[in-house]
Image (tube, rainbow, N blue to C red):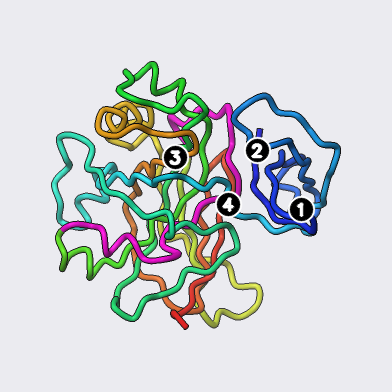
Amino acid sequence: MRIARFAHAGGMSFGVVEGEPEAGAEALTVAQIEGHPFGEIRFTGERWALPDIRLLSPILPSKVVGIGRNYAEHAAELGNEVPAEPLMFLKPTTSVIGHGDVVRLPPQSKQVEYEAELAVVIGASGARRVDKAGAAKAIFGYTCANDVTARDLQRKDVQFTRGKGFDSFCPLGPWIVTGVDASDLEVRCEVLPAGSPPGTEPEVRQLGRTSQMIFDPATLVSYVSHVMTLLPGDVILTGTPSGVGPMAAGDTVSVRIEQVGTLTHRVMTLE
């Protein structure tokens, strides 16, 4: 099931996305549900064609927990060792934006980079000091994420807060997918550079698989839950494959995850 949060003429709602994404946005509809998606799904009877509504970030988490260096090749490309246990950091909720929104390049940084990631969304039970089996049950679903990073500031500061925390530095979407086996999914990042002529194919910048993770999603949820209580809707970013690189104003960046979806955003300077 694909769960979206969207804006329509009557306000904001959650809904179930119907149809096959491969057929294009015009073939998809969104069926509104009552309230939030963590309980029993009840439809209101209202439906919209996907092009007639605006997708928002699929959830507004109380916190976004990032995991660093969870792919060995990515750790190596930045000259880092593989951590012995998950390396955690936090991104503020003000960094969250949705599919089709804009990442704004802050003037403080000269090197803002993309990081395509599978994101875990915590379900109704939350998670507090759970074992791996309990963590697996606490996972509501998955979505796509771009852990946007000001790499120069990350290196300068040592800790990650500023480099990871600017407004718009956490695109999520386009929706949450439930019932997916996330053990071996393709993760890719594609970039259409600024000024590309019409019809230009985007460049594949990252290509990996979730099976290459050092710590799998359930292990991460369990680990984080022994540090902080995970509330319904909280998000864990599971790390990025190798191939990270800079984004420039005018670029269009897409994070594509097999069986999950495609998250696309534009890049602009901060106005």
Q: Is residue 103 left or right of residue 32?
A: left
The residue carrying mark 3 is 234
**Relative height, residue 51 to residue 207 (above, below):** below
Q: Residue at x 42, y 48 (%)?
A: 117
Measure the alpha-carbon separation of dots 1 and 4: 14 Å
Q: Secondary structure at mark 3?
A: loop
Amino acid type indicated by mark 2: Arg
* Residue numbers of the magenta segment: 159-185
Amino acid type indicated by mark 3: Asp
- Could you tell me how many numbered marks the image carries? 4
Answer whether residue 172 is magenta in the image: yes
Characterize the local packing of mark 3: few (<14), some (14-19) or many (20 or more) Cα atoms within 10 angstroms: many
The residue carrying mark 4 is 262
Q: Is residue 268 left or right of residue 65?
A: right
Locate residue 212, reporting x and y percent: 33, 37
Q: Residue at x 27, y 51 (%)?
A: 74
The residue carrying mark 2 is 2
